Amino acid sequence: LPRKPLLKPNTRYLIAPGIDSEELLADASETLTCAKTMATDFAGLVDGSQRHVLLGIAQLIMLSELAVNRALDNLELKTEAPL
């Protein structure tokens, strides 16, 4: 089957190509932690359904953070494995 042509990446927000996966995951984990904190803090300023939405967003961010942290743990375990 013929392959679809690769899309040209948008270089507006380009990440340096030399950064390794562990560093990218660590940065993503920190970013998710900050986003979760912002959503949780903002939820304290509103009432009703808006508060519930923000707390739901914070929980989704937390779940993503847990997944990224697990991926980091898996990378660290691979690098520590005996040869």
Image (cartoon, rainbow, N blue to C red):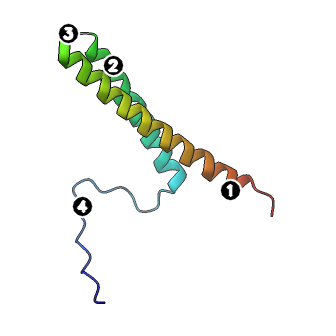
Q: Identify which residue is drawn at 36% across, 34% down.
A: 60
Where is residue 9 drawn, in percent x and y? Answer: 25, 66
Name the residue nearer the viewer: 50 or 28.
50
**Label at residue 11:** 4
Nearest to the eye among marks 3 and 2: give it.
Answer: 3
Report the amino acid beneath label 2. Thr
Asked which quadrant contains residue 43, the reply is top left
Does the residue at mark 1 contact the one at mark 2 (Cβ under 8 Å)? no
Disc number placed over residue 78 in the picture, else none: 1
Disc 4 crowd, CA 10 A, few/some/many (<14, 14-19, 20+) = few
Up-down relation of residue 31 to residue 54 (above or below): below
Q: In the image, what residue type sits under mark 3?
A: Asp
Q: Amino acid at mark 1?
A: Lys
Please name the amino acid that badge 4 sits on: Thr
User: Cα distance, mark 4 to mark 1?
Assistant: 31 Å
Q: Is residue 43 left or right of residue 17?
A: left
- The reply to whether the C-beta atoms of the residues labelled 2 and 4 are less than 8 Å apart is no
Badge 3 local density, few (<14 within 10 Å), some, or many (20+)?
few
Residue beneath disc 3: 47
Q: Which residue is mark 2?
A: 40
Query: Alpha carbon of mark 1 to alpha carbon of mark 3: how far?
Result: 46 Å
In the picture, the quarter occupied by the C terminus is: bottom right
Label 1 close to label 3 by CB (< 8 Å): no
Q: Secondary structure under badge 2?
A: helix
Dot 4 falls on a residue whose secondary structure is loop
Residue extending furthest right? 82
Q: In the image, is 2 to the left or to the right of 20?
A: left
Q: Is residue 82 above or below residue 8?
A: above
Q: Residues within 10 Å of mark 1 (few under 14, many from 20)?
A: few
Alpha carbon distance from label 3 to label 4: 40 Å
